């Protein structure tokens, strides 16, 4: 097959919405949504601020199986309020992880997957978004002790704010070349620190800092995948099947502190990559 | 150092840690000591401004790359010392905003700190945080928000929030005045610690203490409240579920509770 046909044969994962993404990862026919649009649990805080709420609050929780093993896919919808974490969307994510933890503690198999597409805390729900973020971190750290948690950052919103910490707390993180991962989004840095610190319109620069290719090369993510739904479903399943029980990146304090103690004068590009290969 | 750099973190760290030997586990911006509080030896940790920080964007007390990993190291140092309490003294204006920070993975550094605190909590260490100044955004997620019990001083300059006022106004396309007006009626938008307390996320709001110039009696009182929180945490669960159990939580965060109930009912 020539290159064009190969490309045409793909189904872009990035183009899928959150619900379709969850369906793409779960075994065919196994998708079942929890707290779906018909339960109509919406944000209680948005209407008063002139923002129209959405019946799933921008997060899809789906049960089903992955490789025949019970699974839960938590998919964030980047198209609703930038995938931001509010009280309801945050409680859906934290609550699903807490239930997965109960299963894992009871010895019931569970494969949790998080699909990140978010700018972080929803500022219209400020403190409740931040509180939910702490709950999500707590649940991830507890759950990860029992079973691997797989994260995917496909793009195009990327994964920023407190949710970038969640991505860093997964057991295995998959990114596409189009995905980005960072604590502070480029616009926020430019606003806080000035355009000399970071020009948020310089796309090449932005992706060279936080893009999937750089993040995998420098050890902040585990695997680069092409933007194809079948490929991403395959690598997610493979991450569970070949669980290597590596220490979580966020617990490798000596490793990262040693690396940071050896920073070159200009720690960019090749110099940074040479510090430590991405492979764990 | 300019005037609006907060000295409260260091002030309260010194007040609580007293003459205890300082640990040199972290960078100079991460203070750690083992101090006696009540009957217990407590690992006390604070992030403070360092005007010579090698990362210029982290010189005003922000949680940056070295602070995140330094916090993780200071916490992990006491893991395994059966039940040793950990106290985070919180006065952090924000995470560090910068290009080098993103390149070097500040998200992972902050996650490492949160990971260390949560791991300690799960292992049975009572983890307490005492908010004496600002507790903002990613900085608070890294340093303090994984505690079993969050305490705060009742003081106008104590603030727990998702984003600083100016930045939050810009991102939501409002003026600061509009944001302040909205915060009057929409509780989660509030910046003051009293509005935060009404969300049911605080274990205790400590009143009657001068946050800038505490007297010995004030310091004693705060130490007693910390000791009581340690006791309470020892008797409680190792997760964060206590934050959903308060009267205030049932009133102001009913959706957080309802979502969990519905999910549980539909799980299997």
Image (cartoon, coloured by chain):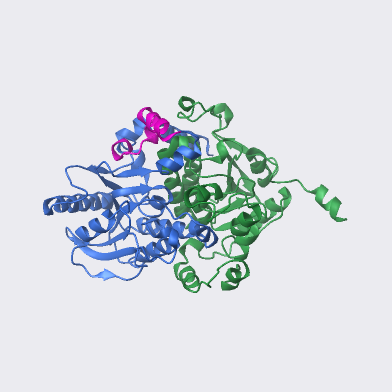
Task: Tell me if residue B181 is in the magenta stretch.
Answer: yes
The letter of the green chain is A
- Which corner quadrant of the image does residue B38 belong to? bottom left
Residue B174 sits above or below residue B76 on the image: above
* Magenta region, residue range: B175-196
Give the side of residue B110 with respect to residue B157, left or right: right
Task: Tell me if residue A143 is in the magenta stretch.
Answer: no
Q: Main secondary structure of the magenta part?
A: helix
Give the side of residue B201 with respect to residue A138, left or right: left
Residue A109 visible in rendering: yes
Residue B112 sits above or below residue B264 on the image: below
Give the side of residue B162 with respect to residue A266, left or right: left
The letter of the blue chain is B
| Quarter of the N terminus of chain A within the rendering | bottom right
Q: Position of residue B109 (x, y in %)?
A: 46, 60
| Quarter of the C terminus of chain A within the rendering | bottom right
User: Which residue is at 31% across, 37% downward?
Assistant: B246
User: Which residue is at 43% across, 46% downward?
Assistant: A135
Q: Position of residue A96 (x, y in %)?
A: 50, 43
Residue B15 sits above or below residue A9 on the image: below
Q: Position of residue A28 (x, y in %)?
A: 70, 43
**Nearer-the-camera pick, B24 or A99:** B24
Residue A87 visible in rendering: no
Give the side of residue A139 with respect to residue A221, left or right: left
């Amino acid at each position: 097959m020539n290159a064009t046909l190969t490309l045409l044969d793909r189904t872009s994962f990035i183009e899928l919405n959150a619900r379709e993404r969850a369906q793409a990862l779960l075994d065919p026919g196994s998708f079942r949504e929890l707290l779906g649009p018909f339960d109509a649990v919406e944000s209680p805080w948005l209407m008063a601020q002139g923002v129209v709420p959405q019946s799933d609050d921008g997060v899809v929780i789906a049960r089903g199986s992955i490789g025949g093993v019970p699974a839960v896919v938590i998919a964030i919808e980047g198209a609703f309020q930038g995938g931001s974490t509010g009280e309801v969307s945050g409680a859906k994510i934290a609550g699903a992880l807490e239930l997965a933890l109960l299963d894992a503690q009871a010895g019931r198999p569970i494969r949790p997957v998080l699909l990140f597409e978010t700018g972080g805390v929803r500022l219209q729900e400020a403190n409740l978004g931040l509180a939910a973020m702490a709950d999500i971190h707590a649940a991830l750290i507890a759950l990860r002790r029992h079973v691997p948690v797989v994260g995917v950052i496909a793009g195009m919103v990327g994964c920023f704010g407190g949710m970038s910490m969640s991505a860093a707390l997964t057991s295995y993180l998959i990114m596409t070349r189009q995905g980005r991962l960072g604590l502070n989004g480029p616009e926020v840095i430019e606003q806080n620190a000035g355009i000399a610190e970071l020009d948020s319109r310089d796309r090449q620069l932005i992706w060279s800092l936080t893009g999937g290719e750089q993040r995998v090369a420098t050890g902040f993510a585990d695997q680069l995948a092409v933007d194809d739904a079948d490929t991403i479903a395959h690598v997610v399943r493979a991450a569970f099947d070949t669980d290597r029980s590596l220490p979580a990146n966020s617990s490798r304090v000596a490793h990262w502190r040693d690396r940071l103690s050896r920073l070159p004068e200009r720690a960019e590009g090749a110099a940074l990559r040479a510090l430590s290969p991405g492979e764990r | 150092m300019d005037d609006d750099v907060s000295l409260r973190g260091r002030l309260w760290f010194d007040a609580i840690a007293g003459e205890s030997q300082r640990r040199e586990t972290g960078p100079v911006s991460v203070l750690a000591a083992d101090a006696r509080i009540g009957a217990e030896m407590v690992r006390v940790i604070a992030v403070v401004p360092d005007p010579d920080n090698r990362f210029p964007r982290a010189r005003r007390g922000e949680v940056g790359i070295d602070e995140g990993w330094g916090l993780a190291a200071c916490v992990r140092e006491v893991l395994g010392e059966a039940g040793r309490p950990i106290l985070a003294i919180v006065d952090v204006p924000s995470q560090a905003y910068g290009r080098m920070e993103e390149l070097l993975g500040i998200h992972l550094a902050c996650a490492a700190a949160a990971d260390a605190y949560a791991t300690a909590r799960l292992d049975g260490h009572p983890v307490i945080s005492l908010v004496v100044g600002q507790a903002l955004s990613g900085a608070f997620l890294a340093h303090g928000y994984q505690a079993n019990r969050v305490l705060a001083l009742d003081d106008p300059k104590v603030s727990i929030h998702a984003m600083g006022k100016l930045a939050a106004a810009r991102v939501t396309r409002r003026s600061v005045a509009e944001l302040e007006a909205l915060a009057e009626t929409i509780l989660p938008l509030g910046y003051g610690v009293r509005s935060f307390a009404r969300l049911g996320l605080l274990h205790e709001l400590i009143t009657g203490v001068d946050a800038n110039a505490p007297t010995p009696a004030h310091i004693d009182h705060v130490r007693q409240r910390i000791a009581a929180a340690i006791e309470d945490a020892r008797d409680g669960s190792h997760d964060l579920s206590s934050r959903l159990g308060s009267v205030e939580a049932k009133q102001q965060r009913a959706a957080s509770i309802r979502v969990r109930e519905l999910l549980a009912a539909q799980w299997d």
